[in-house]
Image: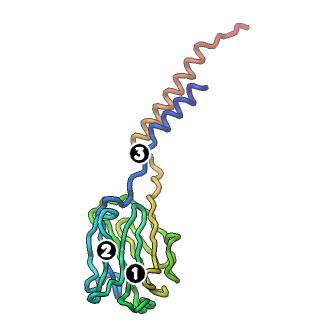
């Protein structure tokens, strides 16, 4: 019984692989969209950047007015408003179908992910309804929010890898079959060594 437990533990350790970096070093495209999801604003990109490694992107639709800064960690997208030309706030976005950002996988190298509003989000009114995503894009819509205050407003989008599907990979199947084979051989060996009592 101890041997079976030891073999099972070795199989689990052999199958464990470290989690891959989700965004670090990946090429990401960012565009500022307004007034709908298909229209890029003047000066709004799309810009391709290397997530985590490159400096944050600054979006400046009006000369000398950096309205938004987009930066990345390995597992999150952070949007802030570092300064608004001394005005103090960017008011509630205009009531249009879409007023926000599209963050895309530029070259199809980012693993499938889930996206959620992060705990560090301070923009009043920004919630799950402002966030949509698919395999290659995240849409961050500012409609319905209270806007940004200089240096004090943040939107954090947390990303996590999607769970593995219900069909195991070939390597997992091979280890499973090998494990059953070893367990069966050990049971067969045990039966061969057990003396049979005659009646």
Q: Secondary structure at mark 3?
A: loop
How far separated are the C-alphas under marks 3 and 2?
38 Å
Residue sitting farthest toward the top? 198
Q: Quadrant of residue 48?
A: bottom left
- Between disc 3 and disc 2, whose residue precedes? 2
- At 49% from the left edge and 81% from the top edge, which residue is drawn? 123
Residue 197 lies left or right of residue 84; in this view the side is right
The residue at which mark 2 appears reads as 57
**Viewer-closest of 158 and 141:** 158
Q: Is residue 5 left or right of residue 34?
A: right
State which quarter of the image contains the C terminus. top right
Reply above or below: 82 against 179. below
Residue 104: percent from left, percent from top:
33, 69
Residue designated by label 1: 81
For mark 2, give the secondary structure.
strand
The location of residue 155, given as percent across then percent down, is 45, 76
- Residue beneath the point at 40% across and 92% down: 87
Q: Which residue is nearer to you in this view: 83 or 184?
A: 83
Q: Is residue 160 left or right of residue 48?
A: right
Q: Residue at x 36, y 80 (%)?
A: 68
Disc 1/disc 2 C-alpha distance (Å):
11 Å
Marks 3, 2: nearer the viewer: 2
What residue did someone put label 3 on? 169
């Amino acid at each position: 019984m101890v041997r079976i437990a030891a073999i099972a533990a070795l199989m689990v350790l052999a199958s464990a692989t470290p989690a891959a970096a989700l965004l670090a070093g990946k090429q990401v495209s960012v565009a500022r969209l307004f007034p709908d999801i298909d229209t890029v604003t003047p000066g709004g990109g799309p810009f391709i950047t290397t997530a985590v490694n490159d400096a944050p992107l600054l979006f400046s639709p009006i000369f000398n007015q950096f309205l938004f800064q987009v930066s990345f960690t390995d597992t999150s997208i952070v949007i802030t408003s570092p300064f608004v030309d001394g005005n103090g706030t960017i008011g509630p976005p205009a009531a249009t179908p879409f007023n926000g950002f599209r963050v895309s996988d530029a070259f199809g190298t980012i693993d499938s992910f889930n996206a959620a509003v992060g705990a560090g989000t301070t923009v009043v009114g920004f919630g799950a309804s402002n966030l949509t995503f698919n395999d290659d894009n995240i849409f961050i819509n500012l409609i319905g929010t209270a806007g940004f205050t200089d240096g004090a407003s943040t939107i954090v989008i947390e990303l996590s890898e999607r769970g593995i599907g219900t069909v195991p990979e070939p390597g997992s199947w091979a280890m499973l079959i090998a494990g059953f084979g070893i367990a069966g051989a050990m049971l067969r060996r045990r039966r061969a060594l057990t003396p049979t009592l005659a009646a």
